[in-house]
Image: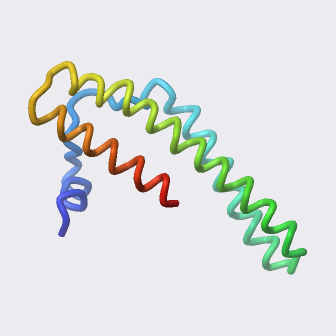
């Protein structure tokens, strides 16, 4: 089991206090529910054998919506968790910067 998997399973995420996105939590939940609806709509379009380009247009819209959520979360993380760790300094700051850099790399690859 990886460290991330172990942390997730144990409820420990390496961060004390509120997460950076907490002030926008309701907005994120609303946006994710909308994306969930888009995914169901896409399933329906395939089920109903809609035109390929129409499905691709909706996939593109859903992708942009997910990217928007990801960038918002990344911004919240940088302005809260990373900034807080950088102010503290030391190994925690290095770890948070690496964590943010790795997250950015994953987003760029997707």
Task: Find residue 22 and report its image quarter.
Answer: top left
Q: Residue 88: percent from the left, percent from the top?
A: 15, 21
Q: Residue 9: percent from the left, percent from the top?
A: 23, 58
21 and 76: which is toward the camera: 76
* Image position of 23 (left or right of 14): right
Chosen colour scheme: rainbow
- Please give the name of the residue rendered at 28% of the width and 45% of the height, measured from the top-left corner: 99
Q: Residue 94: percent from the left, percent from the top?
A: 18, 37
| Relative to 64, residue 40 above or below | below
Q: Residue 108: percent from the left, percent from the top?
A: 49, 53
Quadrant that contains the N terminus = bottom left
Task: Please give the count of numbered marks on the rendered protein.
Answer: 0
69 and 101: which is toward the camera: 101
| Relative to 15, residue 38 above or below | below
48 and 67: which is toward the camera: 67
Residue furthest toward the right?
Answer: 51
* Image position of 61 (left or right of 2): right
- Please give the name of the residue rendered at 88% of the width and 75% of the height, measured from the top-left corner: 50
| Relative to 59, residue 46 above or below | below
Residue furthest toward the top?
Answer: 87
Task: Find residue 14 and report its image quarter.
Answer: top left
* Image position of 103 (left or right of 59): left
- Please give the name of the residue rendered at 18% of the width and 60% of the height, measured from the top-left corner: 6
Residue furthest toward the left?
Answer: 90
């Amino acid at each position: 089991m990886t460290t991330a998997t172990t942390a997730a399973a144990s409820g420990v995420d390496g961060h004390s206090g509120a997460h950076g996105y907490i002030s926008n939590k309701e907005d994120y939940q609303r946006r994710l529910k909308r994306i969930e609806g888009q995914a169901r709509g896409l399933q329906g379009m395939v089920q109903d054998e809609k035109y390929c380009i129409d499905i691709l247009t909706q996939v593109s819209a859903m992708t942009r919506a997910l990217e928007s959520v990801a960038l918002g979360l990344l911004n919240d993380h940088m302005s809260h968790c990373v900034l807080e760790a950088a102010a503290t300094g030391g190994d925690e700051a290095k770890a948070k910067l690496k964590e943010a850099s790795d997250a950015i790399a994953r987003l760029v690859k997707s």
